[in-house]
Image: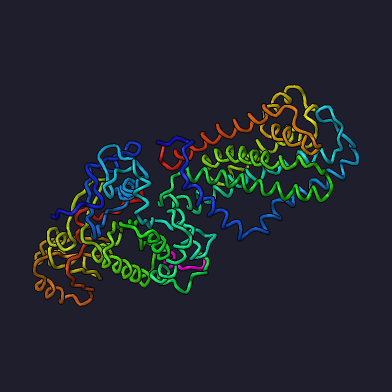
Amino acid sequence: MSTQTPLLEATAVCKQLGSQQVVQSLDLEILPGQCLGLIGPNGAGKTTTIRMLLGLSKPDSGSISVFGLKQPLFSRQIRAQLGVVGQFDTLDPDFNCEENLLAYGRYFGIPAKTIIERTPSLLEFAALGHKAKARIDALSGGMKRRLSLARALVNGPRLLVLDEPTTGLDPQARHLMWERLNRLRKEGTSILLTTHFMDEAERLCDQIVVIDHGRKIAQGSPRALISEHVEPHVVEVFGPGLMDALPQFTEYSDRLEQSGETVCFYGQEPHRLLQALEAMPALRVLHRPANLEDVFLKLTGRQIREAS
Amino acid sequence: MNNPFFVSRAWLPVFLRNFMVWRKLFWPSLIGNIAEPLFVLVAFGFGVGALVGSVRFADQELSYLVFLASGSICASTMTAASFEALYSAYSRMSPQKTWDGIMNAPVNLNDIIFAELVWAGFKSLFTASAILLVMLALGISYSVKLIAALPLLFLTGICFASLALIFNALAKGYDFFTYYITLFLTPMTFLSGVYFPREQLPPALGMLADVLPLTASVNLVRPLFLDEWPSAPILPLVTLIGFALISFSIASRLTHKRFGLA
């Protein structure tokens, strides 16, 4: 693909927890400036993978190097150049926003004076310029996540690791988070992202790795994955009488998927199906281009994964 | 890789983090820490002291008030260090996930545990110093040798913080600490010659009391109140240092296990 040296390289990584093989022979690579999305259902091995990449857990076999340094042997030197936003907020509830940045920057050995100089621009970036003295419990969920992001940037990291950065946020807060992450990407920051939201992965990532049961099952750019794995047109239908009438529509699509009360028709050419559906005006019909969620559901199945 | 005695200088910013929080809560924390020991001192020292008169310690007669003051300052140090390394450290470790956040920076778990240890020692020393100042103001003792009590009380705090960190590593919730306090710390206070001379204990209990770290602390600190040096300081010093080193290494191992880093 390129002759650039990867910032992060994982080769044939395996990890067993208890009797379960959580990660199996996983390869990953992040090039400078790239945003890599790691997606997979609950229990697919994402969190375990992230923990190993951060050096918090040792792989049973395989190798991981970050910035050319072996993990977990050089974990401390690696973390000095990483920015991490974990799945859960670990902000310090005893401090206000600017004190959080000060305390966190000191863990990197950055002098207090330097951190205090950087604080206004970091808070501004997080759209928290007016909240410098606010206590953490007075912040909304979106503000906390953005402060976590600002905190992860305090050391000017070469690679940002974001574990489900927008889980639990309302749409406005998610859009603001995406806008900020895209701004970082334009500035050349490399990002590793895990997410449950396919629209998020599609918007932010250059490369997507889909994992399930600890294995990589697909990899590529969002567009490449969509064109490779699913038909370009999707017609989503739900409403009264749909299930009984279903057989008369099947011939108009290449493939259909049923989840709950909704049926998705996948095909190269949707117009005949749309015409046929006009015969049942009570149905709700949505015609849209195929997206990453369709790929994800096709590859990992539609059954619910209970938290494991 | 996880040598429990390997600590990098990254422990210092973690200590400073706790210090920054404490500075904000200075007054409530001070009052909370010294009020109870002073109530005990007034109620028992002046009240019971009037009934008891004097007691014997190391072949010397001393007033019950001095006896109690010199013992209870050790017990208060023990309590302050234990509470900090149990409840407060647990809050930071588990519900607040402060430790998880710190470990994403170039700080290792052992640096954090060590910082918590020194922090609990510092806080207990602060409590002890405040109590000591009040005792001086009450005229309980005027000995200049009490300056030597400060490092000894710091060592006492470190010793009990190390022990507490073991239970911190094992805790599934705050309730667990109640057992440690009521089944271990409270009886130890009664066995260690804080409230009454250990010679009053039945011989079997007396032998047990001899090896307890709080006994060691009391044996080192009490003579200083009488303007004397401890006559046999080696054994109690070795007891305190030994308990501290062994407990810290166990606490470190168990905490690494808890975090899946063993």
Percent position of residue B42, x then y: 83, 48
Left or right: where does residue B1 sit relative to residue A38?
right
The structure residue drawn at horizontal position 62% and vertical position 46%, both measured from the top left corner, is: B83
Percent position of residue B135, x then y: 79, 47
Q: Can residue B17 be seen by looking at this rendering?
A: yes
Total numbered circles? 0
Judge whether A117 appears above or below A80 on screen: below
Q: Quadrant of residue A272?
A: bottom left
- The question of residue A139 being in magenta is answered with yes
Percent position of residue A239, x then y: 25, 70
Left or right: where does residue A115 sit relative to residue B194?
left
Which residue is outermost to the top? Answer: B203
Q: Quadrant of residue B160?
A: top right
Which contiguous range is marked in magenta? A137-144
- The question of residue B105 being in magenta is answered with no
Q: Can residue A199 be seen by looking at this rendering?
A: no
Left or right: where does residue A285 sit relative to residue B149?
left
The structure residue drawn at horizontal position 69% and vertical position 49%, both measured from the top left corner, is: B127
Judge whether A253 appears above or below B148 on screen: below
Residue closest to the eye, A72 or B168: A72
The structure residue drawn at horizontal position 46% and vertical position 41%, both measured from the top left corner, is: B258
The structure residue drawn at horizontal position 23% and vertical position 57%, both measured from the top left corner, is: A32
Give the overall secondary structure of the magenta segment.
helix
Residue closest to the eye, A214 or A142: A142
Which corner quadrant holds the N terminus of chain A?
bottom left
Percent position of residue A271, x then y: 10, 73
Q: Quadrant of residue A291?
A: bottom left
Left or right: where does residue B191 sit relative to residue A239?
right
